[in-house]
């Protein structure tokens, strides 16, 4: 089997596809990996052929990147140049054995064009987070807004259609339909309906206990556990961090996401909240200019720390709610303060709260006082600690990766 993998975005988007790609490669399949050019070291280190796609790092400075409603437009426009290269890549491949395209959801419009030109092509979509799949069932988050459980399904469908028509379709459909027209394909009228109907198989990269299968999710559907891929599983904590951890009580670790360059207010509020509560802190960001110019001795800055090695040593993890960071905290049994900004983060935060494994504070509402209040709910909470241990115990179950590979093989060769 020849597997072509295509993804977009940050390392958090990349690693789940490397989790699948390395497993398929180990089973003897040919794997070609298409991703943003800056991720080449990760892919080549994993031993997979890499084909770099254009990526503009300036998108990280766009003021709307982390906006709850305008963020999608920024991500969409930033990924189109890369996705436009997928059909040409597929066209250049020689005729061969059974071919599978394993795609990020935002690559599905181009994947559909590839199948039109190559009718035997099978397409599998990998969904990294529950909110990537639309549903009218509970729990239903529309960005930062939770739909009450008493709202009937008919009204929920109307809400979805209305929001998609106003916030998604005007942004995405012009690009999608221009690309379709160039390949002689008819236009489509709804982005969500279009991409949901494209895959031959949909794969959810999160477990049933975190997000139960909904009746209106696409079928056929394959469920796995969290794809906790670590590019450096043996990485150790730095000497400075080991010294800091040994010098006092466990700190609260803060990360707004490695790609977030707009977190100055977040870190300033965190520093003041820690001072008010008398807690130690660890600030994780590769962008030092976001932090206060000077930090007290009880706050340490690190540009990168492997979470798997760090989290057993913290009192709590405050983070943005990215699905990979959320999963790492659940595996470690670390209490979480989720501070969501946009995209899937609000839904992930709601699920952490529902598990009893953390609290949530909307990033737009962050102040030192609110940060301190939220941390009081998390740090030293014995009941929450037990819920975190219960969640951590669930990771003893198989991830389902081998079963996924078997399923991909069977449906690709059918």
Image (cartoon, rainbow, N blue to C red):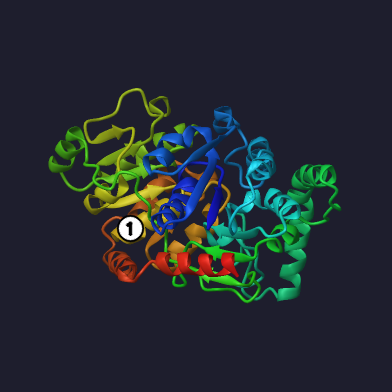
The foreground one among 4 and 150 is: 4
The foreground one among 174 and 231 is: 231
Residue 144, quarter of picture: bottom right
Q: Is residue 50 left or right of residue 252?
A: right
Is any part of residue 377 visible from this angle?
no
Is any part of residue 136 visible from this angle?
yes
Question: Crowding near pointer 1: few (<14 within 10 Å), some, many (20+)?
Answer: many
Q: Is residue 59 above or below residue 3?
A: above
Q: Position of residue 114 (x, y in %)?
A: 70, 50
Position of the C terminus by quadrant: bottom right
Q: Is residue 101 left or right of residue 393?
A: right
The total of numbered circles placed on residues is 1
Q: Is residue 213 left or right of residue 78?
A: left
| Picture residue at 77% right of the left edge, 46% below the top | 176
Q: Position of residue 222 (x, y in %)?
A: 53, 70
Q: Identify residue for label 1.
A: 335
| Picture residue at 44% right of the left edge, 57% below the top | 24
Q: Is residue 356 above or below residue 9?
A: below
SS at circle 1: loop
| Picture residue at 54% right of the left edge, 53% below the top | 3
Q: Position of residue 35 (x, y in %)?
A: 54, 41
Q: Is residue 267 left or right of residue 174?
A: left
Q: Is residue 201 above or below residue 300?
A: below
Residue 257, quarter of picture: top left
| Picture residue at 48% right of the left edge, 32% below the top | 38
The foreground one among 165 and 118 is: 118
Q: Position of residue 369 (x, y in %)?
A: 41, 45
């Amino acid at each position: 089997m020849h597997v072509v993998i295509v993804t977009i975005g940050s390392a958090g988007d990349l690693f789940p596809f490397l989790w699948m790609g390395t497993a398929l490669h180990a089973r003897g399949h040919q794997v070609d990996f298409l991703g943003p050019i800056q991720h080449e070291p990760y892919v080549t280190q994993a031993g997979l052929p890499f084909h770099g796609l254009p990526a503009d790092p300036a998108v990280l400075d766009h003021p709307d990147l982390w906006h709850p409603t305008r963020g999608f437009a920024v991500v969409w426009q930033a990924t189109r140049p890369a996705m436009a290269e997928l059909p040409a890549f597929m066209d250049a491949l020689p005729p061969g054995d059974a071919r599978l395209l394993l795609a990020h959801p935002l690559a599905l419009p181009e994947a559909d064009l590839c199948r039109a030109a190559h009718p035997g092509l099978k397409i599998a979509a990998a969904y990294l987070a529950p909110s990537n799949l639309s549903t009218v069932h509970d729990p239903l988050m529309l960005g930062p807004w939770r739909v009450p459980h008493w709202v009937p399904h008919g009204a929920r469908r109307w809400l979805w259609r209305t929001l998609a028509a106003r916030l998604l379709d005007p942004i995405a459909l012009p690009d999608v339909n221009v690309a379709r027209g160039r390949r002689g394909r008819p236009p489509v009228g709804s982005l969500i309906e279009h991409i949901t109907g494209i895959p031959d198989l949909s794969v959810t990269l999160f477990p049933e206990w975190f997000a139960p299968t909904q009746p209106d999710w696409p079928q056929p559907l394959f469920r796995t556990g969290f794809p906790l891929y670590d590019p450096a599983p043996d990485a150790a904590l730095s000497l400075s961090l080991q010294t800091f951890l040994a010098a006092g009580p466990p700190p609260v670790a803060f990360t707004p996401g490695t790609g977030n360059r707009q977190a100055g207010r977040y870190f300033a509020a965190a520093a003041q909240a820690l001072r008010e509560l008398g807690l130690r802190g660890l600030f994780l960001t590769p962008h030092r200019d976001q932090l206060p110019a000077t930090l007290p001795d009880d706050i340490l800055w690190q540009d990168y720390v492997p979470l798997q090695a760090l989290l057993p040593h913290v009192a709590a993890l405050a983070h943005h709610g990215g699905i990979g960071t959320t999963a790492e905290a659940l595996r470690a049994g670390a209490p979480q303060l989720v501070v969501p900004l946009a995209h899937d983060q609000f839904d992930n935060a709601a699920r952490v709260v529902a598990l009893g494994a953390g609290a949530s504070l909307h990033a737009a509402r962050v102040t030192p006082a609110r940060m301190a209040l939220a941390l009081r709910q998390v740090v030293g909470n014995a009941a929450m600690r037990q819920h975190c241990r219960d969640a951590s115990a669930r990771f003893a179950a198989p991830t389902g990766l081998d079963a996924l590979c078997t399923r991909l093989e069977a449906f690709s060769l059918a």
